[in-house]
Image: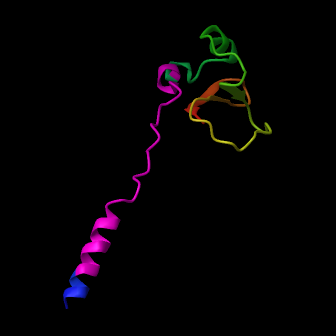
Amino acid sequence: MRMMLAGFGLVAVLAGCEETPVAETEDACGASSYQSLIGQDRAAVTAAGLEPGQKVRIYGPGAMLTMDYRADRINVELDNADRVIKVTCG
């Protein structure tokens, strides 16, 4: 009985040692600052200082994209008329 209680105590102590995963913030890239671009054309995107590069991805329908997730990258999705339909991180 004493050994059983010691075993339960050890399990409880070790369970507390488990690492807590760090949650990604939903707006790590600052996409919320650019939500006003939705409905605007591509020229408004570049006028806002967003140029395609390592931290900015501007793409339209049918574009081939890498599937890597980067919390610090802003994704600007355009429709067929080159109007912004979504601004997200990733």
Pick the front one: 22 or 42:
22
- Residue at 69%, 42% in the rendered image: 68
Q: Is residue 78 left or right of residue 63?
A: left
**Span colored in magenta:** 6-34
- Residue at 29%, 80% in the rendered image: 7
* Percent x, y of residue 9: 24, 74
Pick the front one: 55 or 86:
55
* Percent x, y of residue 11: 31, 73
* Percent x, y of residue 54: 70, 25
**Quarter of the figure that contains the N terminus:** bottom left
Is residue 51 part of the magenta span, yes or no? no
- Residue at 73%, 32% in the rendered image: 60
Q: Residue furthest top?
A: 47
Q: Is residue 29 left or right of residue 41?
A: left
Is residue 21 part of the magenta span, yes or no? yes
Specify the color scheme. Answer: rainbow
- Residue at 66%, 17% in the rendered image: 41
Q: Residue furthest bottom?
A: 1
Task: Judge whether 7 appears above or below 27 on screen.
Answer: below
